[in-house]
Amino acid sequence: MSERKSAAYRLGLITLAMLAVLTIIEFFVAVYVQSVYVQSLVLLFIIAVVKAAIIVQNFMHIARLWREESH
Amino acid sequence: MSAVTTHSPHDDAHGHEVPYETQMRSNRLGLWMFMFSELFLFGALFTTRFVLWGNTRPALSQEIGLLATGILLLSSFFMYRCEVGAANGDQKTFLRSALLAALMGTIFFIMVVVMEWNVFGLSGELFGIELFGHLKPSDGVYGGVFYAMTGMHALHVLSGIALILIIWWNGRRGFFTPERHWGVEATAIYWHYVDVVWVFFYPALYLMGHAVK
């Protein structure tokens, strides 16, 4: 039980770190690749999709939708 | 002579208790379907930005945008800890994290309404960073789209904060157990959804396109 809890808290920290890094990358892409509109737009959109996927998977637990047990 | 009892299907429906696991699955599916329906609303606003702004965007404070995004992500992290705490019977972490998530959400809300919308008409700088925005709802397509997107999102932030405070209050009274804490799980999923929406709104409003003064 305790190990499961620690793993869950660790996952939260790892997810936060990944989101923070991606947000910073996003910011620099906007600042430095802005002159190439289409490329920066596509890149920013891809980063947003990756960030959303990480939140949906790790924070929102979408997998619970088709899992048998209650928790 | 035996007694005859009348037994209708109607009685069956009321007498039968749905197992908790089945109820949870239905609850989760219902919540996700609700969020999917909300996707049309936010998707329409997101599309409107590209149709009306194209390759441009209003000159907004990059620092405020980045800071507000960071605070909302941090708030999501605390909401996650809150749910893990409730699921593992860690009451202290659950209550403390719920309050921190609500606090971060409130700071985000204040940053959008007081600083970016500048509802009090303030002005000022900190370390050369302009703290208050200039864009008004009447400023053509820029003002209209910006206020529609941030306004709709802020409304969801506000309702999320209210839900977090409700679960915090109920949690203090021992309402949730590691086995039964659907209220906490639903609030957490909703709060993360609000975060996911901002994940798309932030680059669309602050980063994509050339800034127009």
Image (spheres, grey):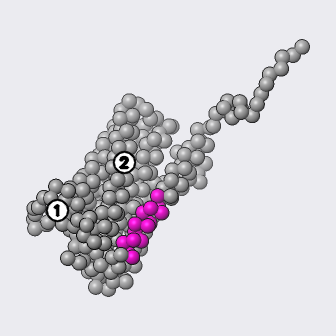
Q: Residue at x 23, y 78 (%)?
A: B212
Task: Residue at the far bottom: name it.
Answer: A36
Q: Quadrant of residue B165?
A: top left
The chain letter under disc 2 is B
The stretch drawn in magenta includes residue B84: no
The residue range painted magenta reads B38-51
Which quadrant, please, contains the N terminus of chain B?
top right
| Residue A18: x %, y % from top left | 36, 64
Q: Chain of mark 1?
A: B
- The residue labelled by disc 2 is B159
User: Residue B40 lies in magenta, yes or no?
Assistant: yes
Determine whether, in the image, residue B136 is placed left or right of residue A70: left
Q: Position of residue B118 (x, y in %)?
A: 19, 59
* Circle 1 SS class: loop
Which residue sits furthest right? B1
Who is closer to the viewer here, B83 or B149? B149
Provide the secondary structure element on which disc 2 rests.
helix
Which residue, given by chain and number where applicable, does mark 1 sit on?
B132
In 3D space, how far apart are the residues under numbered discs 2 and 1 (Cα atoms)? 24 Å
- The x and y percentages for residue B78 are 34, 49
Q: How many marks?
A: 2
Asked if labels 1 and 2 touch by Cβ distance under 8 angstroms, the answer is no
Amino acid marked by disc 1: Phe
Q: Earlier in the sequence, mark 2 or mark 1?
A: 1
- Looking at numbered disc 2 in the image, what kind of residue is underneath it? Ser
Magenta span main SS? helix
Whether residue A43 is visible, yes or no, is no
